[in-house]
Amino acid sequence: MDENDVLAVVAPRLRQFAAVARAEHMTRAADEIGVPQSTLSRGIARLERDLGVALFVRAGRAVRLTRAGRTLLRHAERALAELDAAGREIVEDADAVRGRVALGFLHTFGAEAVPRLLREFRRTHAGVRFDLAQGGHDALLERLRAGEVDLCVTSPLPPDFGLTSTAMYEQELRLVVPADHPLAIHRDGLPLAAAAKAQFVGYRPGFGLRSLTEAWCREAGFVPRLAFEGEDGETLRGLVGAGLGVALLAPSAHGAAAGVVELPVTAPRTTRTVGLVWVADREVAPAVRVFRDFLRHAGPKLLAPRA
């Protein structure tokens, strides 16, 4: 009998064999695994016959392992432990109530919007676990394609046939200027072209708002001069307050910041579509599907800034 034959013979019977080996008694082992004692005795005898070796020395219903039995038990216990662990992990990850979701999102949604989403979802799905990834637009989409995250909350929505996107809400971007800047008097709004001669602070390449800012400035007839490139909106807002430049930013999650003024832009229309993105043809676990459906239904209301 070669190793493949041994596997075919032993695999379905490992639990019966291990139960007898641990109990050293046929009746107690039968009670432990819930089978008739006669069925268990016949099963062990058939296993020994198929393997061609004695696994137990018998004394009535009491038994003790032979050398071959001890060898089999050593490997059987490791195999059973691995199978049990695999089964638990598969069941938990495939469980809509206790599964795992990997969610990616932009930095601008980390302070309030995403915590609000998770808090509301966990009211009815407290057992679902989350792996969270925060980053720039391009990096999040790469992690999505690589299977490192299941879903992304991002902007702009990618024109990629391999990805599925659903819009959730429109977010207005405002021109943030120092409170003592000449443009700060335009509280009712101004065209973006009015900032053509100003220095800007903005996001690094790879962030969605970097590409959008450049596109809006081109539409307004100029190329922005960047004095600083960063990754965090609140840092950029602080630098505006310090007089380093102006910026197109999403509304602050912390309310109006000292030393800056947020001005509506009248032309072009500086709004971005925030949405949910996932890989189009990738099978996902039930927990991911449940959370995705929740986001599509409740996300538009929960993501939008609170008044």
Image (cartoon, rainbow, N blue to C red):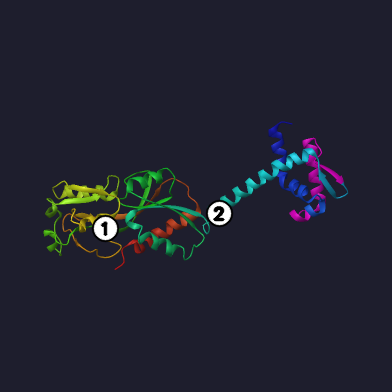
Residue appearing at x 40%, y 45% in the figure: 143
Closest to the observer, 4 or 105: 105
Residue 209 seen from this side: yes
Residue appearing at x 73%, y 40% in the figure: 72
Q: Which mark is residue 250?
A: 1
The type of residue carrying mark 2 is Glu
Instruction: Name the side, left or right, on which 135 lies relative to 248.
Output: right
Q: Nearer the viewer, mark 2 or mark 1?
A: 1
The quadrant in which the N terminus is found is top right
Disc 2 + disc 1, Cβ < 8 Å:
no
Instruction: Name the side, left or right, on which 240 lies relative to 138.
Output: left
Where in the figure is residue 25, as x and y percent of width and height? 82, 51
Residue appearing at x 78%, y 45% in the figure: 43
Q: Secondary structure at mark 2?
A: helix
Q: Residues within 10 Å of mark 1 (few under 14, many from 20)?
A: many
- Check the image and report above or below for 17 versus 255: above
Q: Residue furthest top?
A: 2
Mark 1 or mark 2, which is nearer the start of the sequence? 2
Residue 166 lies in quadrant: bottom left
Where in the figure is residue 129, as x and y percent of width and height? 49, 56
Closest to the observer, 85 or 238: 238
Secondary structure character of the magenta stretch overall? helix
Where in the figure is residue 260, as x and y percent of width and height? 20, 61
Q: CA distance from mark 2 to mark 1?
A: 38 Å
- What segment is highlighted magenta in the picture? 30-58
- Check the image and report above or below for 261 versus 78: below
Query: Which residue, given by chain and number where applicable, does mark 2 sit on?
Result: 92
The type of residue carrying mark 1 is Ala
User: Per the image, is 212 magenta?
Assistant: no
Residue 11 seen from this side: no
